Each structure stands twice: as structure tokens, then as C-alpha cells.
Image (cartoon, grey):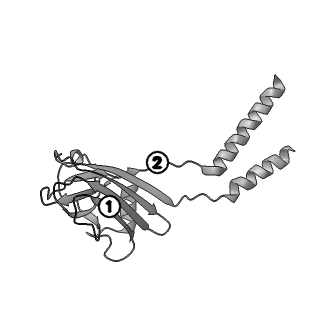
Amino acid sequence: MKTKLFGLLAALAFAVPANASMLEFQATLLGANEAPPNLSQATGSILVTLDDATDMLTVHETFSGLTAPSTVAHIHCCTPITSPPVAVPVVLPFTGFPNVSSGTYDHTFDLTATGVLINGMTAPVFISNLEAGLTYANIHDANFPGGEIRGQLVPGPIAGAGLPGLILACGGLLGWWRRRRKIA
């Protein structure tokens, strides 16, 4: 009986493949995150999903309350948000970013395509810095040409082991409980 139970648990654990190649990064964009900070009441959020098997990067950014329509948005690399306002290279310009004060931007980039990453940046170096927390997203407008809101991209929530991990954990707890019951 025990052999069948463990066989079933092992089969279920390997039947559901893990999706380890999708990495998520997120940030809250605020004027207080600019260097130097500004008093803008605008807010935004960005979710960046990287498929590290194909080097495809999907950007979903929402923002509202800019003091003027946006002029440009992009990702800077390779520095933490606490750095002083020095010239940090733009490495991923957001093609087709809307010229509005509130809106949404969705785009998927092929990081290996020519011209997607600029200023000499390569996909491996960009991905390495993204994973290290050394990239930030920025939205600029006419009132804040240096950037009205920005946020440091950090790893998103960890989804956990999924169904296989849950099944194994429950099996382990069940085994522990049954063994404890026999002893008592």
C-alpha cells in the first residue's frame, strides 16, 4: 500500500511541469523615487515578465496623474534607485508609449533583436542586471524632463512549488500524522 501511495505521489509530482523560465519583476512608480525626488502626485506600476528561455520581455505599465502628457518612457540600467541623479544609460526604450497623462502600455520585446536594447547593451548583461535589481523604469514629460515617476524593478511574488509541491507536502504531513497516531 505504501509503495502505491509513494508511486502515485511521484507520478503526480512529475506530471505537472514547472514553469521555471518565466521571471516576474515589478515596481511602483512615484515622484518620490526620482533622483532627486519630486512632489508629483502621479503614480504608476509596472510588471515585467521575462521568458529567460526565449529572451522575450513583456512590459505591462499603468500610470495616472502625470502633470503633462508623457514624452518618453523606458528602462534604465545598471544602477540602484538610491544612486544620485547621474546619467544612467537608457537601455530599453518603450516603443509606441502613449502620449497621455494617464494610461496603459503593453508591449513584448525580443531582447535579441537588433535595435531593441541600445547604448551597447546585450541581452545577457541586461538580464543579469534585471535579476540583480539594478534596473528601473521611468516616465518623463515636459514638466519633468528628467523623469516624473520611476520605480526600481524587483523580483515579483514567488509562486511556490505549485501543485506538485502541495501534493508532496500533504503526503508528508499525512505520513507524519499516521506515524504519530500509531505511536500514541
Count of residue discs:
2
Could you tell me if residue 80 is visible in this image? no
- Residue pointed to by mark 2: 157
As drawn, is 63 to the left or to the right of 39? right
Quadrant of residue 143 within the rendered picture:
bottom left
- Residue 102 position, x and y percent, is 25, 58
Q: At numbered mark 2, what does the secondary structure look like: helix, strand or loop?
A: loop
Looking at marks 2 and 1 on the same chain, the residue that comes earlier in the sequence is marked by 1
For the residue marked with disc 1, what is the amino acid? Thr
Question: Residue shown at 50%/48% (left/top)?
Answer: 158
- Residue 25 position, x and y percent, is 40, 54
Could you tell me if residue 11 is visible in this image? yes
- Residue 115 position, x and y percent, is 31, 75
Question: Local crowd at mark 1 within 10 Å, few (<14), some, or many (≥20)?
Answer: some
For the residue marked with disc 2, what is the amino acid? Pro
Q: Tell me: residue 132, above or below residue 110.
A: above
- Residue pointed to by mark 1: 104
Question: Residue shown at 70%/59% (left/top)?
Answer: 15
Question: Residue shown at 19%/48% (left/top)?
Answer: 35
Residue reaching furthest to the top: 184
- Residue 121 position, x and y percent, is 31, 67
